[in-house]
């Protein structure tokens, strides 16, 4: 059986020279790779007690939903501004080259609920930090973050140092 890293396609110099782009689509397109990714991420957090799984648009949906399903937990969406139909709470945050806004339904997290965040990647940690702040604004307690890939050279782990972060694959560079 192949290792999880072997399913990730690396594209040099994308989107700019010097960047090694780690392509999650190659994992998703292989049934064994997808299965191994979900199982590995789920195994990393098997000791955590959580009430709800939260995932950001769009790849957090892909990895978070099966983990929620397998553990009989609800799944909560975090989306880009303007995509959710009910009353929302939102947060603005800085990107490397601009700003972004994410939001979630105001009634999706109840005070005191323990939350597991699931995503495909942590790089600088900006999006993850924004998700944590949004969840906490609703009274939730983030007990862990699990990602398929961590780009350790971008120091996202340091940005969310007060929270547990589990990564299925850690790449040392950017």
Image (cartoon, grey):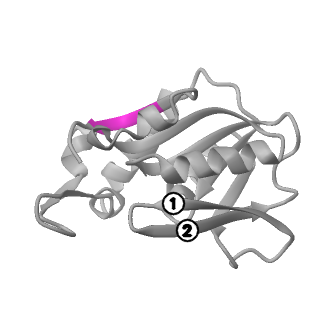
State the residue at coordinates (70%, 25%). 49
Picture mark count? 2
Instruction: Label the magenta part by its dominant secondary structure.
Output: strand
Residue 58, given in percent of the width and then of the height, sits at 52, 66
In the image, residue 166 above or below residue 7: above
Q: Nearer the viewer, residue 146 or 124?
A: 124
Q: Is disc 2 placed on a helix, strand or loop? A: strand
Residue 109, given in percent of the width and then of the height, sits at 82, 48
Judging by the rendered image, the residue that carries numbered circle 1 is 94
Q: Is residue 42 magenta?
A: no
Count residues near mark 2 (Cα–Cα under 10 Å), then give few for <14, some for 14-19, many for 20+.
some
- Residue 158: numbered disc: none
Q: In the image, which residues are magenta? A: 166-170
Q: Nearer the viewer, residue 148 or 129?
A: 129
State the residue at coordinates (43%, 32%). 158
Does residue 1 appear anywhere in the picture? Answer: no
Q: Is disc 1 placed on a helix, strand or loop? A: strand
């Amino acid at each position: 059986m192949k290792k999880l890293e072997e399913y990730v396609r690396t594209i040099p110099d994308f989107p700019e020279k010097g960047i090694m782009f780690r392509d999650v689509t190659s994992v998703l397109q292989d049934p064994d790779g997808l299965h191994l990714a979900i199982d590995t991420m789920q195994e990393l957090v098997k000791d955590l007690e959580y009430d709800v799984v939260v995932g950001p648009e769009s790849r957090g949906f892909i990895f978070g939903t099966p983990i929620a399903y397998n553990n009989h937990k609800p799944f909560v969406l975090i989306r880009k501004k303007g995509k959710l139909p009910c009353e929302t709470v939102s947060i603005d945050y800085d990107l490397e080259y601009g700003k972004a806004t994410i939001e979630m339904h105001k009634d999706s997290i109840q005070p005191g609920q323990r939350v597991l965040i699931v995503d495909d990647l942590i790089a600088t940690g900006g999006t993850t930090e924004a998700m944590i702040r949004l969840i906490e604004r609703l009274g939730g307690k983030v007990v862990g973050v699990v990602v398929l890939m961590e780009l350790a050279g971008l120091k996202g782990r340091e940005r969310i140092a007060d929270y547990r972060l589990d990564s299925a694959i850690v790449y040392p560079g950017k």
